Image (cartoon, rainbow, N blue to C red):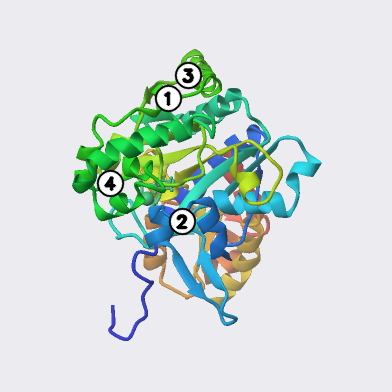
Amino acid sequence: MKKNQIKTVKGFNEVLPPESFRWRMVEDKFRDLLEGYGFAELRLAMLESTELFARSIGDETDIVEKEMYTFLDRSERSLTLRPEGTASVVRAFNQYSFGKTSEINKLYYVGPMFRYERPQKGRYRQFHQLGAEVFGEASFYQDAETLVMLAQLFHTLSVEGVILHLNSLGCEACRPAFRDQLKSFLLDRQTSLCSDCQRRIQENPLRALDCKNPACREAVVGAPQINESLCDDCRDHFSGLCGLLDDAGLDYQVNSQLVRGLDYYTRTTFEFLAGDLGAQNAVAAGGRYDRLVEELGGKPTPAFGFAIGFERLMMLAGDKLAPLSSPFAALVPLGEAALRRLFPIHVNLNRDAQVTTLSFQQKSLKSQLKKADKDGVMYALIVGPDELSQEIAICRNMRTKEQTQLPLRNLEEALQELYHEC
Ligand code: ATP
Ligand code: MG
């Protein structure tokens, strides 16, 4: 790369061909599955008021404290590039009063997210998520349906070895007592904790359970377990969910330290972890957030959602996808007159799918056939001055090298027929 060329901002992951074709295949499978379960797509703003994330994700989370792309615009408003999707979907749910038109709202999104993290394998500053949220359903059946649907996506993509980790964080009835227990446990070990966790003990002690610092990980071994402090309703919700997952044959591990890096969760939280991903092993994550709609100014509405890391999903699914399809035939003109004759055939045939390639560059027969071979086409249709005068095209089978003649007059129909035969 030359010195004066401009590059992407560090850690901003872009998707280039042929990878972009594979992304499309996976995205299509995601859309088909979700639409089958009654979800509809939202395409939302990528830039939001900073306050939206401070109020929803939580002031004292890593995301809000350290990872957001926040700046003042020309009118000195504080704006933030969205670090995740849920806050924006809830904002939209309230702003457009979705709850008024329908009791249950199932919404999904696909798009880039932005976090100022240290770029490494599976971790970028611009990355992409496939996510969904369900509003208006408090039943644990909803949690189960969504988790089974995610497992079905992994199955459809032949992604194996992904394990569901599950926890319940309780609700406003039972969590305060647990927080107090955890607070006193952490205060006893205060000096072993990182400075962030020490600072957060009073306001947000649960954050220590999510801290990635090895010293903190060690210090919280033996911490009180939230699932032992759940109220009856939360316990019923969790055991109801576990029972449905058992019935559906979906394996899971209860992980009592799974609190997630966002403050809005109530009751169910989960992560799908993949051994093959190394240190960045969470491929999807989410949970229930029954209070957030209200906290962001809406009517009390229970909700459940998830986000899949698209890059991480592609690392798991990438090489198991069907190979990309090649164009069917190469049109090989020799000379301007032949190119002119083949051009309308080329554009007519490619209307619905890529059937033909056509070079506009007047290349030699040899180089055009070499390119056709590289593209993996089935046939090359060669037309030079002699063929033009005889109103024919030479049809070369690229595998057998057999050559036949086709009348130029109805070449389009003949190719159409061959294409549909194979
Ligand atoms: P991690 O523990 O890996 O930091 P997280 O808990 O911060 O993940 P969430 O906010 O729950 O992640 O986002 C959902 C999913 O998005 C993650 O499970 C992961 O697959 C993906 N993800 C999160 N941050 C990044 C990133 N910086 N780069 C790529 N993918 C990411
Ligand atoms: Mg993170």
Q: Is residue 83 above or below residue 333?
A: above
Q: Name the element at disc 3.
A: helix
Q: Amino acid at mark 4?
A: Lys
Alpha carbon of mark 1 to alpha carbon of mark 4: how far?
24 Å
Residue 315 location (% of width, % of height): 35, 45
Give the image quarter of residue 1: bottom left
Mark 4 or mark 1, which is nearer the start of the sequence? Answer: 4
Secondary structure, mark 2, is loop
Tell me which amino acid carries mark 1. Answer: Ser
On the question of residue 132 being in view, the answer is yes
Q: Is residue 306 above or below residue 344?
A: above
Residue sitting at 60 percent across and 66 percent down? 342
Q: Is residue 166 above or below residue 69?
A: above
Disc 1 within 8 angstroms of ligand 1 (CB)? no
Circle 1/circle 4 CB separation < 8 Å: no
Instruction: Kindly identify which residue carries mark 4.
Output: 212
Residue name at image x 41 percent, y 71 percent: 364
* Residue type of the residue flagged with mark 2: Asp
Residue count near mark 4 (Cα–Cα under 10 Å), binned few <14, some 14–19, many ≥20: few
Nearest to viewer (mark 3 / mark 1): 1
Which residue in the protein does label 3 denote?
A: 242
SS class of the residue under badge 1?
A: loop
Q: Nearer the viewer, mark 1 or mark 4?
A: 1
State whether residue 391 appears in this view. no
Q: Which residue is mark 2?
A: 59
Report how far apart the C-alphas of labels 4 and 3 lie in the structure: 27 Å
Badge 2 crowding class, 10 Å Cα cut-off, few under 14, some 14 to 19, many 20 or more, is some
In the rendered structure, which disc, 4 or 2, sits on the residue that comes first in sequence?
2
